[in-house]
Image (cartoon, rainbow, N blue to C red):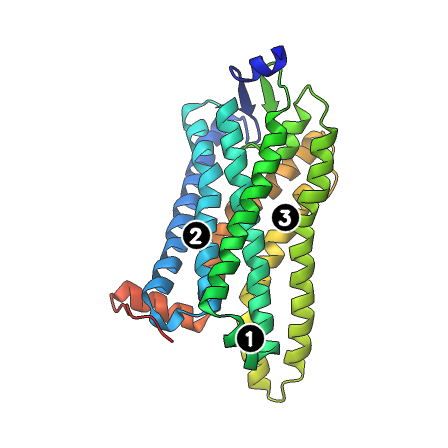
Amino acid sequence: MAGANRTSIFEFLLWGLSERPEQQRILFLLFLWMYVVTVAGNLLIVLAIGTDARLHTPMYFFLASLSCADILFTSTTVPKALVNIETQSRSISYAGCLVQLYFFLTFGDMDIFLLATMAYDRYLAICHPLHYKLVMSRQRCALLVTAGWVLTNLVAMTHTFLIFRLSFCSKKIIPDFFCDLGPLMKVSCSDTQVNELVLLFLGGAVILIPFILILISYIHIVSAILRVPSAQGRRKAFSTCGSHLAVVALFFGTVIRAYLCPSSSSSNSIEENTAAAVMYTVVTPLLNPFIYSLRNKDMKCALARFLRGKIFFSWGQ
């Protein structure tokens, strides 16, 4: 009980970014630029899709949902990092840390769920085109996204509650720029065996099951595309899936590296873990708008129409 009482009054120290004074201004400007571009780029995608009736299809509905999740995901970690860099303070309160952890897990897991849903959408569109409109109705799309939010909130609540029951007896240094499960368990003075088992099985399932479903979907997709007789048809099909595959490779590659690969407490390993965290929390949401817009003709046209003010408000059939 004494340990639990002490957890309510102390702060964690986020020690993941460089501590060299000469690098603080560069880090602040770099993170600020990436955050502004991430929010602006993803917001443009949401507005372009929402205001153009020609993009009111399941594929773009899921893309708009992914952009919303990316904005929220990045906003969970980067603003606090910017404040800490600017104020020369690395502290975060115990309550603030738990709140950040909860939303970080919710929005991060939602990204994973949406990437898997988008792969399933492409699988249906390419491998079962005759049943596509029947299966991917508006109601079904809304149900899938709603189910994703419910599941990710339940997973985040489970992990956050298990961290809440741990004791932290004094000021603790977290070797990261935000509060995450692994670093918090390492600095706890309680038995974390239950947390580690839940992270292994529940966290592993949240990452690996969608990843395996994505791989299975794309095995079927590639097989179907290779059977298309015309070279132009194959190019068009590959182009449709190429953007999604690029995002999946970038996001899952860094997430699997951060959560499912063992790491030591050496300085080199801490730097590698921080670099991986920056990749999936900041860089991937930053690149998503560029990957999806530059490789997608419909998206480029919608963005151009939106920026010119030629907006279509009616929903397409």
Q: Check if mark 1's residue and mark 2's residue have beta carbons within 8 Å.
A: no
Q: CA distance from mark 1 to mark 2?
A: 23 Å
Quarter occupied by the N terminus: top right
Please provide percent x and percent y for residue 139.
46, 65
**Of marks 2 and 3, the one in the foreground:** 2
Amino acid type indicated by mark 1: Ala
Local packing at callout 2 (Cα closer than 10 Å; few below 14, some 14-19, many 20+) is: some
Q: Is residue 200 above or below residue 246?
A: above
Within-10-Å neighbours for mark 1: few <14, some 14–19, many 20+: many
Q: Is residue 223 above or below residue 81?
A: below
The number of numbered discs placed on residues in the rendered structure image is: 3
Q: Which mark is residue 254?
A: 3
In the rendered structure, which amino acid carries the disc numbered 2?
Cys
Measuring 62% from the left and 29% from the top, which residue is drawn there?
Answer: 163
Residue 223 position in % (x across, y down): 69, 77
Tell me the residue that label 1 is attached to. Answer: 125
For label 2, the SS is: helix
The residue drawn where x is 45% and y is 32% is 80
In-front residue for pair 117/245:
117
Q: Earlier in the sequence, mark 1 or mark 2?
A: 2
> Which residue, given by chain and number where applicable, does mark 2 sit on?
68
